[in-house]
Image (spheres, rainbow, N blue to C red):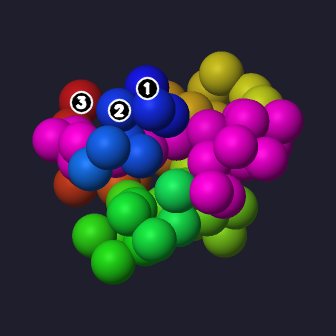
Amino acid sequence: MIEKVKGGWTEFDVAVATSEAMKEVRKLGKVLGPRGLMPNPKTGSVTDEHCGRDQAVQDRAGGIS
């Protein structure tokens, strides 16, 4: 998926990552950042907890249940 995004693919609404994966995701900042898709610990989209990921997706996607 990282390779697809590097190629310019951004046909998704929310990007959620684990803290370990952020080492690679940071490299995508120029693609994801301007579109508001870059995972961010402050918004909860960088988490190692399963329930945290679910909440981050709901929050970033506008409360989809």
The magenta stretch is 9-27
Percent position (x, y) of residue 17? 62, 39
Quarter of the picture holding the C terminus: top left
> To which quarter of the image does residue 53 belong?
top right
Please give the residue where the numbered disc 3 appears in the rendered image: 65
Residue under the image location 35 percent in, 32 percent down: 4
Q: Nearer the viewer, residue 52 or 28?
A: 28
Placement of 33 over or under 3, stated as above or below: below
Question: SS class of the residue under badge 1?
Answer: loop
Q: Are marks 2 and 1 in contact (CB under 8 Å)?
A: yes
Q: Looking at the picture, tell me which residue is in the foreground, 5 or 47.
A: 5
x and y, in percent, of residue 50 in the image: 65, 21
Mark 1 highlights which residue?
A: 1
Residue at the extreme bottom of the image, as rendered: 34
Q: Quadrant of residue 64?
A: top left
Mark linked to residue 42? none
Task: Report the residue at 28% width, 70% height from top.
Answer: 35
Q: Secondary structure at mark 2?
A: helix
Q: Using the rendered view, name the quadrant where residue 47 is placed.
A: top right
SS at circle 3: loop
User: Residue beneath label 2, please?
Assistant: 4
Q: Left or right: 61 with respect to 5? A: left
Horizontal placement of 59 versus 45: left or right? left
Is 26 colored magenta in this rendering? yes
The stretch drawn in magenta includes residue 33: no
